[in-house]
Image (cartoon, helix red, strand yellow):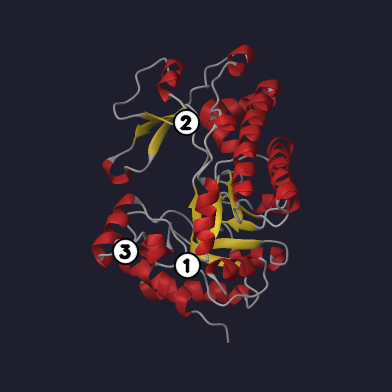
Amino acid sequence: MTKKDNLISLIKRQGYEEAPVYFDLCPSLIEKYKEETKSDKSYQEYFDMPWRCIEDRKLINHDTEKYRSYYNFQLKEGTYIDEWGVAHEPGSEAAMHMTYMRHPMKDLTTMEELEAYPFPDFANADHADQKAQCDEYHAKGLAAMGNMQCTVWELSWYMRSMEQLMMDMITDPEKAAFILDRVTELSIIRAVSFVKAGADMLFFGDDVGMQNSIMLSEDMYVTWLKPRLKKIIDTVREINPNIIIFYHSCGFITPFIPHLIDVGVDVLNPVQPECMSFDEIHKKYNDKISFYGTIGTQTTMPFGTPAEIKEEVTKNLTLAGKKGGLICAPTHLLEPEVPWENILAYVEACKNFKLI
């Protein structure tokens, strides 16, 4: 099997030949990787990861400076404004890859102001390189991924602010519907572009969980977010019925799992062991959905020993069984406190895993 074929077979719970390796490194760990390996390869290539991400559509003549007029205060020095108009103020030196977000639509009070907001024009964006990237990855036996882990909810509240958007949902539903629908339309344009280019997988997601509880009620999720996610998935499945859908949400989201299955999600990411029991979720849903994660980045990866990491990987892959259904991986970006030997222990555990 190629890496792609092995991955897809595992996700479809049809068996697999090797346990895939996947993780993301923060900037300081990328430097550590270069120092330790002396390799000029990307760490994804060095560790034989089974997929690569395709570039998103590139906006044309999209000057983000126009969004500064939406901030009636001085932004911190070093702030950058992203393509949605969200200002990212720099974090501390210890967490320089983290930012403090400012919300450009937070203080807009009328529908006219919301409708006038300059959303990014993905419909007229450049996507000429996407097919070539897919072809390149496929030629190497790798899967091609369209990465849209902020899909509806997060992009919407990043612009409006979470507090204001939640208040809109309750007291001013016209405003909430406008923002969520506009973001959904743009997400469809991006998703369709990935699929038409030849992507094998799409990575959707919106954080809807906290450490020990859901972020919004199940009724609110079903009313506001579920139908919009379903619309996106239904649209791409009309083009490619076999497209594999990943869905990311941090935290505790157990009540939402049946809804994610219902709209057609194939892989639940990241199954944080600090928030949800993989054993319990697997027993209940293993014939309906596959899983990604289970190796905690709050606990095991930074603070466990190499032996404990190997034990956790082996335990979870054994639980998933011969049919697969688990991409056993660190649940989130690996942060500076994760020891290099723990990363190597995770890789070794996956590569050496064999079901008897």
Q: Amino acid at mark 1?
A: Val
Question: Residue 143 falls in which quadrant of the image?
Answer: bottom right
Q: For label 2, count other residues whose C-alpha is less than 10 Å away and answer few (under 14), some (14-19) or many (20+).
A: some
Q: Label 3, label 1: how many angstroms apart (C-alpha)? A: 17 Å
- At 50% across and 79% down in the image, what residue appears? 353
Return the residue at label 1: 21
Lower position in the chain sequence, tag 3 or tag 1: 1
Q: Residue 251 appears at what percent x and percent y?
A: 55, 51
Q: Amino acid at mark 2?
A: Glu
Q: For label 1, count other residues whose C-alpha is less than 10 Å away and answer few (under 14), some (14-19) or many (20+).
A: many
Mark nearest the camera among 3 and 1 is: 1
Return the residue at label 3: 339
Q: Report helix, strand or loop for mark 3.
A: loop
Question: Residue 345 falls in which quadrant of the image?
Answer: bottom left
| Nearer to us in this view, 87 or 189 | 189
**Can you say whether 168 is above or below 326 in the image?**
above
Q: Are marks 3 and 1 in contact (CB under 8 Å)?
A: no
**Can you say whether 180 is above or below 147 in the image?**
above
**Can you say whether 83 is above or below 339 in the image?**
above
Q: Is residue 91 visible?
A: yes
Q: Residue 326 appears at what percent x and percent y?
A: 59, 67
The disc label shown at residue 83, or none: 2
The total number of labels drawn is 3
